[in-house]
Amino acid sequence: AFLWTVRLFSFSFSFCTKYFSSSLRLLLEQSPPEISKEGKAKWLRNLITMMERQSLIRLWSSFLYISTLFWMQVHSHSEYLIGLGSYDITGPAADVNMMGYADMAQVASGIHFRLRARTFIVSEPQGKPVVFVNIDACMASQIVTLKVIERLKARYGDLYTEKNVGISGIHTHAGPGGYLQYVVYIVTSLGFVRQSFDALVDGIENSIIQAHENLRPGSIFISNGELLDAGVNRSPSAYLNNPSEERSEYKYDTDKEMTLLKFVDDQWGPVGSFNWFATHGTSMSRTNSLISGDNKGAAARLMEDWFEQREELISDEIPRRVSSIIRNHQDSHEELLELASYFESQPGRAATRVSSSARRVRSPLRKADKPGFVSAFCQTNCGDVSPNVLGAFCLDTGLPCDFNHSTCGGRNELCYGRGPGYPDEFESTRVIGERQFKKALDLFNKASEELQGKVDYRQVYVDFSQLNVTLTKKDGSSEVVRTCPAAMGFAFAAGTTDGPGAFDFTQGDDKGNPFWRMVRNALKTPHKKQMDCHYPKPILLDTGEMTKPYAWAPSILSLQILRIGKLFILSVPGEFTTMAGRRLRDAVKTQLKSSGDKELSGGEIHVVIAGLANGYSQYVTTFEEYQVQRYEGASTLFGPHTLTGYIQEFKKLSKSLVLGRTVQPGPQPPNLLDKQVSFLTPVVMDSTPGGDSFGDVISDVPKNLSVKRGSDLVAVVFQSACPRNDLLTEGTFALVERLEREDKSWTPVYDDDDLCLRFKWSRPKRFSSRSQATIEWRIPESASPGVYRITHFGAAKRLFGSVQHFTGSSSAFVVT
């Protein structure tokens, strides 16, 4: 082991030396041309300092990883090895239908802020690890999960498999679609979108690799608390159909508890937090076309930035976030205007792929020599929970919608939920995100219960299209029933108050109508056995029995439990309603308490549901809610006994887990990647008007512009190209830069991963080769006074396929 360590050290030193010299030459070529000779020297010194630290990180990371297990055995008193990672998964920001509302008119055309995969790995010193990945996507995808596991096995062997890797989506409805493998989920995206799929697979894999390489001795603390104003029940009439004695056990008709994990590295201190809280990712409406992590993604951005800025204030390290610490020169307004007048817009010019990554605010080159803080806001049983907390109202009258059916005058199209920032959905997203962030921060600061004990897992595949389920009756007798092949009811097409449907569908419809039955029968007529199985759901789409050109809906689902001491994470491939989630958690907790496991005796057992995990199969309601046939009941694919089936199988899994028994893997799900088809038009070429270049400013800031913090908006329009040419992963399409007075260099302060900066892309006509980018900066109160400019990065495709990166900058302006 010692000889291998020495060899690895020698190899790492050689590699880092070559990396340092080649990267230095490349970055020197990319230095801003307008910087003075003295400024360029300072810029180069700063780069060298950053790169020296990065080289040292790479030099020691491999060495430390090999020696960590041995070191922990000898020196560390920590219970676990912990590692966290984060990587960009922002997919195509143009032309691709967004996943969530199933609205073909909702097509991506820019970025609100970027999407990320965030991972934690926990392991006992000599045990197998558990991996949990939270993705800023509508849901996990079975085919994405299968591909990620395939890559992990190629890299790590059997260390990471489908058994101990859980991938959960936050349920944003503002991310690119086309990455699931079943027909019904990719119809609106015009089939499979390989670019969306690859962005997710690559990002998840890289976040896991980061977490693996960051594994170090550390501790985990858990904390719980109530958050009362971030979600309301959007189907209260269905909730009220649950037994009154059961409802009386709970104060609210949604789960208000947030559960948070705090990860503390033995050397570096806090390195991250993951929390679970139930509220839908529908603060952004179906009219939005900017990629966004919605309220949970916003909360994660706020939490990570809070920690990084806190660290900057108590250390002298090179900051990852610079806008809050740049010195505030006491220049007069006239002096700033005069200074800004010297910097006119920069014409579009050629750039390299690394230009965007090197200039972004949270660039790896700006990281200090310690792991970056990773904070994830995970989804749980959000099935009937809306972030539109003001309630649902009719657009025409302003009155509340009908209680039982969420209609206005008998129709659903005008009934919309209102968020706290109504009518501004961006403000609603920020507010609901901020509320989750503040509660998470409170739990983070007071987390004191340390997790201790076994790290273990169990996973099984279950065919929910024909699962035998044993029901226990009140008199103690039992009855065996079966789940059904997947089918969707008429009320599915009615949508919800977060995103109403169309035509004459309504929630609570348990009859259907002749016209839509005729349309249904043209696709597939359900047989009597199927209709009886799903009763009282009237079947609109018999998806479980539709197989052309390949399967329309899933049948084989992954169920998984990840254990860390007294914490049990239940990974479920769907959206459980509030009461359905409560029943599942209670059943598993009861099973665990009766297991005889000494580690679980005394103290609280924590059970959380990780929703939309490892695949997707729509909703899971209680039997009683199913009878009402609102949207959630109509979208419970496998019939009225779906929840009971989940409870039955999770009780089996939890029993096997605590008793140390192996479980049979179950039937393998299909891999339909080779069967996928796409009708999305590729990018043929990009062009500009004669005499113009990509990156040229079309609409500049006004001359002598002076704007105020906290209230004003600055917008600049550039000649651009389709963002699908290069996703600029871990880069940025938009940048706000602040002028450094001493050397006239430009410092990045905001990019397209900031909530205050929006990148909007458009074509004059649908199939035009010309396009433009509008970059809007809503100046936050925290911005420092000074001279600023806006910069755009992009990539243009030539007629014969080559891609040329470009950049351009606006004229300078003053912020006071």
Image (spheres, helix red, strand yellow):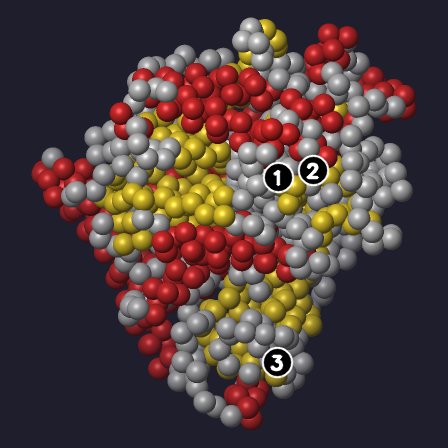
At x 61%, y 80%, the residue is: 707
Label 2–label 3 contact, CB within 8 A: no
Whole-percent x, y for residue 198 in the image: 52, 38
Place residue 309 in its image quadrant: bottom left
What label does residue 34 carry, if any?
Answer: none
| Front tag of 2 and 3 | 2
Q: Quadrant of the N terminus?
A: top left
- Amino acid beneath label 2: Pro
Tell me how far mark 2 sits from mark 1, CA to CA: 8 Å
Estimate how packed mark 3 is, as few (under 14), some (14 to 19) or many (20 or more) residues with alpha carbons within 10 Å: some
Question: Horizontal placement of 552 versus 393: left or right?
Answer: left
Question: Horizontal placement of 221 versus 146: left or right?
Answer: left
Question: Horizontal placement of 600 versus 745: left or right?
Answer: left
At x 23%, y 56%, the residue is: 56
- Amino acid beneath label 3: Val
Q: Which residue is mark 2?
A: 236
Q: Which residue is mark 1?
A: 253
**Vertical arrangement, residue 230 with respect to residue 601, above or below:** below
At x 65%, y 41%, the residue is: 233
- Which sits earlier in the primary sequence, circle 2 or circle 3? 2
Residue nearer the viewer, 540 or 554: 540
**Vertical arrangement, residue 460 with respect to residue 753, above or below:** above
At x 85%, y 20%, the residue is: 517
Place residue 29 in its image quadrant: bottom left
Label 2–label 1 contact, CB within 8 A: yes
